[in-house]
Image: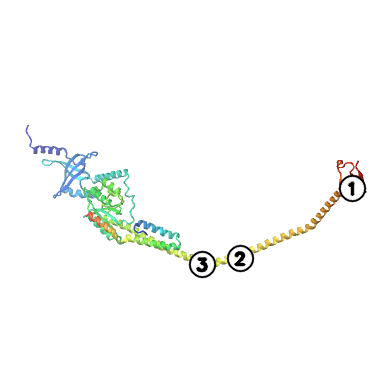
Amino acid sequence: MEALSLYELNNLVRCRLEDTFVDEYWVQAELSDVRSNATGHCYLELIEKDERSNSLIARARAMIWNSTYRLLRPYFEQETGQAFVSGLKVLVRVTVTFHELYGYSLTIVDIDPSYTLGDMARRRREILRQLEEEGVLTLNKELDMPLLPRKIAVISSATAAGYGDFCNQLAGNPYGYVFYPVLFPAMMQGDRIEETIISALNRIYEHQDFWDVVVIIRGGGATSDLSGFDSYLLAANCAQFPLPVITGIGHERDDTVIDAVAHTRVKTPTAAAEYLIARMHDADLALCEQNDRLLQGVSLKLEREKQRLERNSSRLPLLFSGYRIREEKKLSGFEHRMQTALHARIMERRYKMEQLLQRIPFLLSSRIEKEKHHLQLLEQQIQASSPEKLLKRGYSITLKDGKALTDASQVKPGDHIVTRVLHGEIKSIVE
Amino acid sequence: MATKSLTYENAMKRLEQIVSQIENNELNIDQLSTSLKEAQELITFCKGKLYETDTEIKKMLESFQEKEN
């Protein structure tokens, strides 16, 4: 069997492949290892990962000719608000090519940004749902923004324009409020966003009592890679951070996940500074209002007291005369009542006395009659019991030695006794 | 007034309380002058927080800045 040279074999494969894959194909894949060289051609890899294990299950080299890339990249970035970088899910139209020297590769001729947008949104939704299930989604929003957010821990890139804008805006505030911003440097693009921001948050956390608020900002301008802000770990850290987090990461289109969990979301670093100034101004206005109300309240109170004093002093004579009249009336009322009572009392006594006087003769005569009657009774009794009356009737009294005898044994024979009758005495000797 | 531990929020709360007491005519004329004096002190304290640089905070800031750079 005649052997083929490698070139001949590859050429056969190429012919067969180009015969078979004549059309253009829409392919879903993830961008990887995207780079463009001085010629303006873009070289990259399209990969596919297993959804569960996340391990690679397909890979293909790909390239975009500079003529295509010049149009395709701005179109994609404008539509998605997202830089054309590794890690993005894309829907691209490709032709299949095979080169004897470079092997199998795909040439990208078109891209559908809406697919990428959809994928990014889905990823954000998934992260947000997970945070919600864990009960941490709204924790940062539930924190109270301090009345005076003065001590500001700023997470940004030292070299980015955003931080400078932020500080200038704060320092130049028209009211002269004092702010204390300190930069905690972090990467604000590329694949170290998550790691460096979390590290900055940890450094701020060490002095959490000192700081009033955390501000995460990056300069806007050209579209760049924001997918690093759509990170579960970063969002979870922000959501559970004990200080309110303000984001201003210069993304015009969609909120990133970190925007969604932050206490307050603004578009740009300048807007973040304005928010803080406005917050101070609110506090200032509230203070002025209290001041005004205090002055008004005090002058009102003084005015009221003055009126009260005047009212009382003007009413005093009137009140006094009213009082006098009332008292006088009361007094004369008393007098009258006393006189009446006295008079009634006297009349009553007089009547009683008269009654008594009238009864005296009657009482006297009835008493005399009663006594007279009593005397007559006594007289009758006395008369009835007198011995003379008995003697008259023939009774007699026998006496021995002057004493009346009532028993025969009181005498013995030979005793001298005297028997008294109505008229005279009989002297006898007892046998 | 213990200014050392006084926060802006507490100062504002106390100030609001005094103002509402005055507005609701809850203070007599003798209490009024005492409360007015306290309120003015609170306002001065709050204004200071808004407009004046706190040297202690400045010092803390410098130490943080040194660590970060």
- Secondary structure under tag 2 reads helix
Give residue A225's position: percent from left, percent from top.
22, 49
Tag 2 residue: A328
Q: Nearer the viewer, residue A245 or A404?
A: A404
Q: Which of the two labelled residues, at mark 2 and mark 3, occupies the earlier sequence position?
A: 3
Q: Which residue occupies the extreme front position in the image? A: A414
Tag 1 residue: A389
> Mark 2 near mark 1, Cβ–Cβ under 8 Å?
no
Q: Residue at x 18, y 50 (%)?
A: A70
Q: Nearer the viewer, residue A395 or A30?
A: A395
Quick check: A265 left or right of A426?
left
Mark 1 crowdedness (10 Å alpha carbons): few <14, some 14-19, many ≥20:
few
The disc at residue A74 is none
Q: Nearer the viewer, residue A304 or B45?
A: B45
Residues flagged by tags 1 and 3 on a common chain = yes
Tag 3 residue: A313
Q: Which of the two labelled residues, at mark 2 and mark 1, occupies the earlier sequence position?
A: 2
Residues flagged by tags 2 and 3 on a common chain = yes
- Secondary structure under tag 3 reads helix
Give residue A207's position: percent from left, percent from top.
28, 52
Residue B16 visible in the snapshot: yes
- Number of numbered callouts drawn: 3
Give residue A292's position: percent from left, percent from top.
39, 62
Q: Which amino acid lies under the numbered mark 3 shown in the image of this protein?
A: Ser
